[in-house]
Amino acid sequence: KSNARDSLPRAHSSRMPLGARTDLADAAYVGVESYDDVVERAPPNDAVARAVSRAFDFVLVPVTIDDFSKLSVAPGAYAASPSMHSDGCLDSATWSARVVMRLSRATQRDVVMGGEEAGARRELAWAAHVGANAVTFSLDARHRAANVRYANIVSGSLGMLTHTKVWARVRVDDETLEDEDGARTSASSCETSYVEWAAFMSACEHDANVYALLEVGGGDVVHGTWRRWIGERVGAVVLRVDAFRTNARGFPVLPKETQAFIREMFTRNVQVILSDIDSSSRDFERLRCIAPRDVEGDASRVADADAHPMRLYWEYLVYLFRGIDALTEQALIEIPYRDYLQAPLQPLMDNLESVTYETFEKDASKYNQYEEAVRLALLDGVREGDDAVVMVVGAGRGPLVRASLRAANAARRNIIVYAIEKNPNAVVTLQHLAQSDEWRGKVFVCPGDMRSSNLGDVKADIIVSELLGSFGDNELSPECLDGAMWMLKEGGVSIPAEYESFVAPVTAAKLHTGAKVYKDREHMETPYVVQFHRVHRIAEPKSVWTFSHPNKQMPSNERYVTVDFETTHSATIHGFAGYFDALLYSGQSGTVRCSIHPHNHTLGPTGEPMFSWFPMYFPIREPVLARSGERIALHLWRRVDAHKMWYEWLLESPTHGPIHNVNGRSYWIGL
């Protein structure tokens, strides 16, 4: 639901952040689930006051006063005393900012045992009535039918939960499970829990108001399995105190892999809730906490009256939070673009605006690579003292012209540059630059399309272009460069020389929701340019095709490929990521590449990753669960006709889906 809040609001009095930085959003605020609040039947206002006075920012409390007694749900029947605390005990802003509610133990037991569902519906309605930030319940890996009933209950209640999110509680660590008879089983609980979560989300039609509440207890947190949650819709993480170990000094600390998981959640703006409750226990047990008085030499640091039982655990989270590396200046600039779907450019149909050129021109890493490629090409192909012709096709406002002039100076070669540009507005900028002392007599501006420009008998030793798109060929680089090769001398050099496209299946709930929200086929069949943030690669990228220049044989630029992947852990497929790796130049003097492939992303002089191209995202209409060990098969086409280029794609396995974007009906790039 568009009105539901993505996280607990930070604009509230008496907040106690883990650190001063703002780039991690509300991850700086920690919640608490306290055994005392449950057994003492504490009203929400008392629970909030106790938590806020002792460093916490919000609470997770039961919906009902008595967590273990069934409430009356018969029509028109009311108990002698109220079953819920009064909605007047807190104002609406505090309910929204400070309170997450949990379905009562009695109600959850009813759902699990196949009893009445009216209690759960009644409690969800109360959470919606008071405007709690979220309402939660536990999915149970041992009771699949109960999870289906929860999906039915939630689906029927989403219409009223416009300001309250639904958090389905899921275990992330590998615990020892017990069946209904109390017998132990060796099944991987985190794997089983994930599969149940995926089934629950599918039953709820992947509604945008349903999130996972990840619970970490005393079991092992495994790297290969927890990373898939990066791509899921996660509301918060419940970190139980039994997830901690005791160090040599007696303080609670997290195992290394759990530390990595929590840090990663912080960087994805996910909040943590500390808990001293073993909610999986049949007896709803209190977990033992290490208090300041339990640590030798630490008892006097914090007065008992002021210390929350989980104070040391909160302090440890402060340590983890403040140890996260600060974002670079460029990363801060990119925050608004994270997981934001952008339609790819139409380079031949549209003329870029000045602000777009300006943004791309700031990418020093890209132009450093191009400069080096031109320098090496001049060293290998032009004798010192000879003149060379460099044609910059698609010159824009001149960054590649400047890079070529710097390269010629470094290589001690003389060059004449022809700047070919179809955008009449950019041509004006180039004309002004051509009158400057730096360019005068060296640079000639040629307005027009590179495929039809008339330069007479002039031929290029080197043709340079930056027509690459996020998928390599998606901005018509093959068609444009093939059309410009008639201007290249025999034996001349094209920069780039070749570029290879890659795809990988991804879990990306936020991206899928961003396309699905339009409720039409067109947006589910459009590839997008996205700065990935809450995205998980299910398998490593694989190559799909390569284009090379000069392309003397001029074969068709259409392509078709089938790509297979194998999963090492269960994960939900929301679509496919697209990347490119380009060989700008390779010769006797050296090799230069330009890439957004995850394993060899081009870096700038200060270690900043190249930002001119974000990855591509190819959505699929409906998310598909791929179980561990299953084959994922993608069919991908690149289609071209006289007027346009487009992609078509189909997921064949693990579930056979439809062909997306048939005949370019939803998305195409105009020639």
Image (spheres, rainbow, N blue to C red):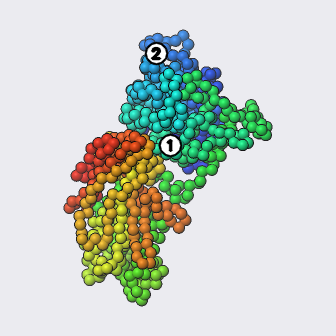
CB atoms of marks 2 and 1 within 8 Å: no
Residue 431 appears in which quarter of the rendering? bottom left
Can residue 378 be seen? no
Residue 111 image point, x, y percent: 45, 22
Which label sits on residue 595? none
Residue 310 appears in which quarter of the rendering? top right
Taking the view exactly as shown, the residue that stands out farthest to the left is 642
Residue 271 image point, x, y percent: 55, 40
Residue at (50, 16) in percent of width and height: 71
Taking the view exactly as shown, the residue that stands out farthest to the bottom is 385
Quadrant containing the N terminus in the rendered view:
top left
Residue 623 image point, x, y percent: 36, 41
Closer to the camera, 628 or 373? 628
Quadrant containing the C terminus in the rendered view:
bottom left
Which label sits on residue 226? 1
Residue at (49, 25) in percent of width and height: 179
| Viewer-nearest of discs 2 and 1 | 1
Is 650 placed left or right of 181 in the picture?
left
Q: Is residue 378 above or below residue 613?
A: below
Residue at numbered disc 2: 73
Is 498 placed left or right of 254 in the picture?
left
Residue at (34, 73) in percent of width and height: 494
Residue at (29, 55) in percent of width and height: 561
Which SS class for mark 1? helix
Mark 2, Cα crowd under 10 Å, few <14 / some 14-19 / many 20+, is some
Real-space Cα separation, disc 2 to disc 1, in angstroms: 39 Å
Q: Amino acid at mark 2?
A: Val
Can residue 305 be seen? yes
Mark 1, Cα crowd under 10 Å, few <14 / some 14-19 / many 20+, is many
Closer to the camera, 344 or 412? 412
Closer to the camera, 155 or 536? 536
Q: Amino acid at mark 1?
A: Trp
